[in-house]
Image: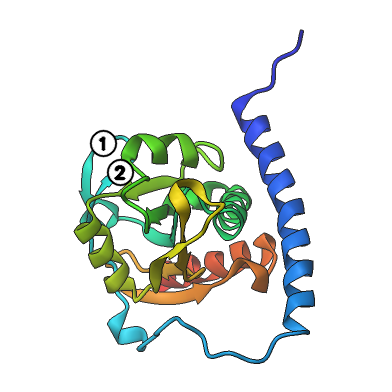
């Protein structure tokens, strides 16, 4: 009986998640047609305040800081493993974009930082990130450490009671993908629904090439 390789499985999973993302997007558009405009909960205070600065533990159990990724650009997304929609679709999106970058993907550190450290231990993160891309890095830590990391990126997050969620709560959080330079400075910010992964890969390649030429 033929077996399925891990890479083939991950690509199939990303395909399924992209299909789910399309359904979520259609539902969101329908919902927007019936709701009043509301101010965003994310407090974004400017490029100068956004920086890569953290002391966390990666999904292999190794203590890391932003300095461990200083040789690469950082593509950073905050979320949690019990997230039902934004997190899996965004991580699948990042995985597809990394595949499209080809050899240039080695110049990027794709990082997923949890906002739910009580449940997202390094072991949980290891199992979770393996579903999306072999290069994806899962970071966790103590509540104080993850809160400090979120603060350095100016990422909104808070627990919300939810009767049907695991442990009776979910996490409200911003859904941005941050592109940081190798020295940890803010470069750009993206959301997966704003462009196809091909467009994001092309955009990041331009920035990588421009950095080499300068």
User: Total of numbered circles in the picture?
Assistant: 2
| Crowding at mark 1 (Cα within 10 Å: few <14, some 14-19, many 20+) | some
Query: Is residue 121 depicted above or below 47 in this figure?
Result: above
Given residues 94 and 148, the one toward you in this image is 148
| Quarter placement of the N terminus | top right
Please state the horizontal and vertical placement of residue 101, each as a whole percent of the image. Answer: 58, 53
Q: Quadrant of residue 25?
A: bottom right
Residue 64 % position (x, y):
22, 48
Please indicate whether residue 70 sits to the left or right of residue 2 in the image.
Answer: left
The foreground one among 62 and 106 is 62
Residues marked 2 and 1 touching at CB (< 8 Å): yes
SS for callout 2: strand
Which quadrant of the structure image shows residue 214?
bottom left
Mark sitting on residue 61 = 1
Q: Which mark is residue 12?
A: none
Residue 73 percent location from the top left of the image: 39, 61
Q: Mark 2 points at which residue?
A: 58
Residue 4 position in % (x across, y down): 69, 21
For mark 1, give the secondary structure. Answer: loop
In the image shown, does 83 or 203 lie closer to the viewer?
83
**In the picture provided, is 84 more to the left or to the right than 214?**
right
Q: Which residue is drawn at 53% across and 51% down?
A: 165
Q: Mark 2 to mark 1: distance in Å?
A: 5 Å
Q: Which residue is drawn at 51% across and 53% down?
A: 104
Between 198 and 43, the one nearer to me in the picture: 43
Image point 46% across, 45% down: which residue? 136
């Amino acid at each position: 009986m033929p077996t399925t390789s891990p890479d083939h499985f991950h690509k199939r999973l990303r395909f399924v998640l992209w299909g789910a993302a399309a359904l979520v997007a259609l539902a969101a558009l329908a919902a927007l047609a019936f709701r009043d405009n509301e101010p965003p909960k994310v407090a974004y205070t400017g490029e100068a305040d956004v920086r890569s600065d953290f002391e966390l533990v990666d999904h292999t159990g190794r203590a890391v800081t932003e300095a461990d990724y200083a040789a690469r650009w950082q593509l950073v997304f905050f979320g949690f493993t019990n997230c039902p929609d934004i997190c899996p679709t965004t991580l699948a999106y990042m995985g597809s974009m990394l595949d499209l970058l080809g050899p240039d993907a080695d110049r990027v550190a794709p990082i997923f930082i949890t906002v739910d450290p009580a449940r997202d231990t390094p072991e949980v993160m290891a199992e979770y990130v393996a579903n999306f891309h072999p290069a994806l890095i899962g970071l966790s830590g103590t509540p104080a450490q993850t809160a400090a990391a979120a603060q350095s990126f100016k990422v909104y997050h808070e627990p919300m009671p939810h009767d049907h969620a695991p442990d009776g709560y979910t996490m409200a959080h911003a859904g941005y993908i941050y592109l940081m330079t190798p020295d940890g400075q803010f470069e750009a910010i993206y959301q997966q629904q704003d462009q196809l992964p091909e467009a994001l890969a092309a955009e990041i390649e331009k920035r990588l090439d421009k950095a080499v030429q300068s």
